Amino acid sequence: MIEQADRGVTQFVILGAGLDSFAQRRPQIASRFTVFEVDPPGPQAWKRRRLIELGYGVPDWLRFVPVDFEAGES
């Protein structure tokens, strides 16, 4: 990932992020990107609350993108 940031990549997308903790485990790397965590709105709301409760907060470079993976036409 560091190599991609050095090459100018500015965004990192995690589909179905769930309880992924990359942004909290590796903030020195993650903060070099705009990190988009894509997941259903319910789990995202819970995760956001827990991050705040645990003292991590939600950094400016972390974005929660709500999506219903099962919606749409088949």
Image (cartoon, grey):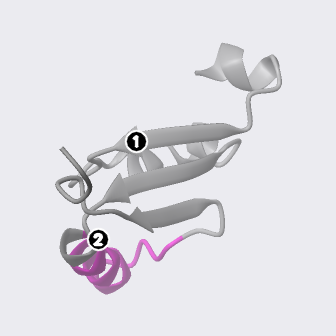
Taking depth in this image into account, of 47 and 26 the one nearest to the observer is: 47
Segment tinted magenta in the rendering: 44-58
Residue 5: image location, x then y, percent: 73, 26
User: In screen coordinates, is 25 left or right of 6?
Assistant: left
Q: Measuring 21% from the left and 54% from the top, which residue is drawn there? A: 19
Is residue 4 inside the magenta stretch?
Answer: no
Q: Check disc 2 and give the amino acid type.
A: Gln
Q: Check disc 1 and give the amino acid type.
A: Ile
Taking depth in this image into account, of 69 and 18 the one nearest to the observer is: 69
Is residue 51 inside the magenta stretch?
Answer: yes
Residue that carries the numbered disc 1 in the rendered image: 14
Q: Secondary structure at mark 2?
A: helix
Q: Secondary structure at mark 1?
A: strand
Main secondary structure of the magenta stretch: helix
In the rendered view, tell whether residue 67 sits above or below residue 74.
below
User: In screen coordinates, is 70 left or right of 68?
Assistant: left
Quadrant of the rendered structure where residue 4 is?
Answer: top right
Q: Measuring 65% from the left and 21% from the top, which residue is drawn there? A: 2
Q: Quick one: quadrant of the C terminus?
A: top left
Taking depth in this image into account, of 26 and 48 the one nearest to the observer is: 48
Quadrant of the rendered structure where residue 25 is?
Answer: top left
Q: How many labels, in total? A: 2
Q: Quick one: quadrant of the N terminus?
A: top right
In the rendered view, tell whether residue 30 sits above or below residue 65.
above
Question: Crowding near pointer 2: few (<14 within 10 Å), some, many (20+)?
Answer: many
Residue that carries the numbered disc 2 in the rendered image: 44
In the rendered view, tell whether residue 63 sits above or below residue 74.
below
